[in-house]
Amino acid sequence: MNTPEGEIRFGDVRITVQYVTPELAAQWLERNRENRNPKQFAIDQFVRMMKADQWPFTGEPIQFVSGTGILANGQNRLRAIIKSGTAQWILIVDGISDPARDVIDTGTRRSFADDFKMRGIPNSASGSALAHMLLKYPDCKPHDRVKFSNAEVLNRYYETPEKIQRLSRALVRVGKEPGLTGGSTLGVVLYHAESLSNVDEVAAFVSELCDPSQAASRKSGTALLNRWHKNRKQVGLNAALAREMVAVSMKAWNLWVSGDTSRSILTYRSGGSQPENWPVLRGWQA
């Protein structure tokens, strides 16, 4: 295929690259029968990327079944083209067998960490988790959106790679401590704390957190955070618990920078994730 208008034949299968406009996408969606339900979160992600001119030619095809012409793959992208009002170059495979529909999109989805590792980014697990949390908690406040694409997480990482790597190493250190969990929920707090204070103070906070002997004699709240993590350790972090852990991590940092030893400040009551109850992160006060 030398040009976008070129064509390849493989038996009854016709392969082309076409410039899919919203009008053409609407026509093809009329052939969208016997398909799974659309994934609205995926459509919304695609729309954002298309509007921002960030949707690349991926080589992932839109596929039609031989004989019936039924749309077998690509409905979410076609809906995104219509919703975004943009046109995209897309690989089109027309004429696949009906049994081929049974194996389309049955592979394993790439995780955020998978994408980071494929690009040679160190600390792929902790780094990708932190970049994801930074999208979910900009300025340490919960975002209305709960789902982000792999590309969005990668783009967020590349905005401040050195800072995310530095904090990723700190989170790996915290993760080695018995009983500590939810590293990325703490990481998003440390990220914003660095902006309010400085790198050295955040490093000192992490050192106390990982050293119970220091934390026991401190004038800060790191020991309380340590104990809270132990009590809340769970397998699988759901959204509600993640918000709770971010809020308590913020409160623990506030204890540390203020020297306040009040234990009640670390309580988390029902409705703590509501905007009016969300804590405000403090900067270091010498």
Image (cartoon, grey):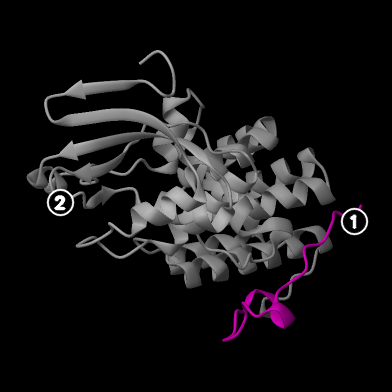
Disc 1 residue type? Answer: Gln
Above or below residue 136? Residue 2 is above
What is the x, y in percent for residue 150? 48, 43
Q: How many marks?
A: 2
Q: Is residue 158 magenta?
A: no
Query: Which SS class for mark 2?
Result: loop
Which mark is nearer the camera, 2 or 1?
2
Query: Which SS class for mark 1?
Result: loop
Q: Nearer the viewer, residue 203 or 242?
A: 242
Compared across the picture, whether 248 is left or right of 75 comes to right
Q: Nearer the viewer, residue 123 or 57?
A: 57
Image quadrant of residue 8? top left
Q: Which mark is residue 285?
A: 1
What is the x, y in percent for residue 183? 52, 51
Look at the image and tell me in which quarter the N terminus lies.
top left
Q: Nearer the viewer, residue 26 or 170?
A: 26
Magenta span: chief secondary structure? loop
Q: Which residues are magenta?
A: 265-286
Compared across the picture, whether 105 is left or right of 273 comes to left
Image quadrant of residue 279? bottom right
Above or below residue 182? Residue 177 is above
Above or below residue 46? Residue 115 is above
Disc 2 residue type? Answer: Thr
Q: Which mark is residue 203?
A: none
Compared across the picture, whether 244 is left or right of 141 comes to left
Q: Nearer the viewer, residue 224 or 116?
A: 116
Q: Residue at x 64, y 66 (%)?
A: 142
